[in-house]
Image (tube, rainbow, N blue to C red):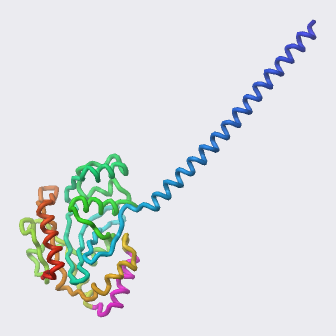
Amino acid sequence: MKQSVGKIFLKRFMQSFLIVSVLLVAGILTYKITMNNWQETAKEDVQEDQEETIQESITQASVDDISKNLIYCYNQETNEITKLVLEIFNSKEKKLTYITIPMRTQLSMSYTLYHKMIAVHPEMPQLLQLSVITKYLNEATVFDYGVLMIEDLLNLKISYYTVIPQETYDTIFVSKMLEDSKESGSTLNTPSVASTLPVEVFTNEYKELLTTIKSTGELRNYIENLYQSVQSNLALPDKLSYVESYSNSTLSDVTYELIEGKNKNSAYLIDSDLAAQQLDKLMQEHMAGKIN
C-alpha cells in the first residue's frame, strides 16, 4: 500500500513537473520571439527616422539674382552667436548691402514657427532675444532655425546662410558708429538709433585685402580658401557662381545699414512696418541700380 501511494505521488509529481517545464519553455520562447520582433520593429523605426532626417533638411539654399545671405559670427569656444548681418547682393547690378541685425533683437515667433520650435525644444519661449537661441538649440540645428526665425521676423526669404568663426569674422567686419565715420559708400537709414547702436562694416585691413585681388581667378581662390573655415548650407560650386559678379564689384558698391527698429534699454525692437519698407526700398534700388 505504501509503495502504491509512493508511486502515485511520484507519478503526479513528474506530471506536474513536466507541465511546469513545458509552460516555462513556452514562456521563454514566446518572450524571445516577442523581443526579437520588437527589436526588429524598433530598428526599422529608427532607420526610417534617420532616413527622414537625412532626406528632409531644415532649410534649402538657393542661388538668386538678388541673394540674401544671413551671416553669423560664431564663437566656437562659448557656443554663442555674437553678430548677425544680412548680406543682400544684386549679382546683375553688382551691388552689396550689409544690414546689421542686433543680437539684442527681441523676437516674438509666429504661432506656426513657435509650434515647430517647441517640437525641437519644448522649453523654448515664444518671446526671446536672438542672443539666447544657442541655449535652446545645438550647433547642428541653430543656424538653420535661426534662418527660419529671421525669415519669420522680417517676412523675407533667405537665400542661404554663412557661419564665420569669430576670429575670422573679426578680420572682415568691425562695429562702427556710421554717423561719426567717413566710410566711403556708407549709408544708414535709421538716424534715430545711429548714435546708440553700431553697424557692422568692413575693416580697413579687409578692404586693403580686397584691393589686392585683381582677377576673377584670384577671387575664386580666396573664396575656396575661405570656405575651408566657414560653414554654409550653400555648396561651394553654387557660391562660386557669384564670383564673376563679385569680381566686378567695387568698394563704392558696398553700403551698410541697421535694420529699422527702436533701442529699448536691454532689447532692440524691430519695427516690422518700417523694416519691411526699408527692405522693399532697398530691393527696388538694387533692381534699379540706384545704390550710391
Task: From the top left corner, tell me how far across and down residue 230 is, in percent.
Answer: 37, 73
Image quadrant holding the N terminus, namely: top right
Residue 12 seen in render: yes
Task: From the top left corner, tell me how far across and down residue 177 is, in percent.
Answer: 13, 72
Question: Is 46 displayed left or right of 274 in the figure?
Answer: right
Q: In terms of secondary structure, what is the magenta stretch mainly?
A: helix
Please report the residue visible at 83 percent of the width from the left and 22 percent of the height from the top.
14
Image quadrant holding the C terminus, namely: bottom left
Q: Magenta region: which residues?
A: 212-229
Residue 265: quarter of image: bottom left
- Who is closer to the viewer here, 59 or 128? 59
Please report the residue visible at 18 percent of the width from the left and 78 percent of the height from the top.
287
Residue 146: quarter of image: bottom left
- Outermost residue to the bottom: 214
Does residue 241 belong to the magenta stretch? no
Residue 160: quarter of image: bottom left
Q: Is residue 26 above or below residue 16?
A: below
Task: From the top left corner, tell me how far across and down residue 45 is, in percent.
Answer: 53, 50
Question: Is 230 displayed left or right of 207 in the figure?
Answer: right
- Outermost residue to the left: 192
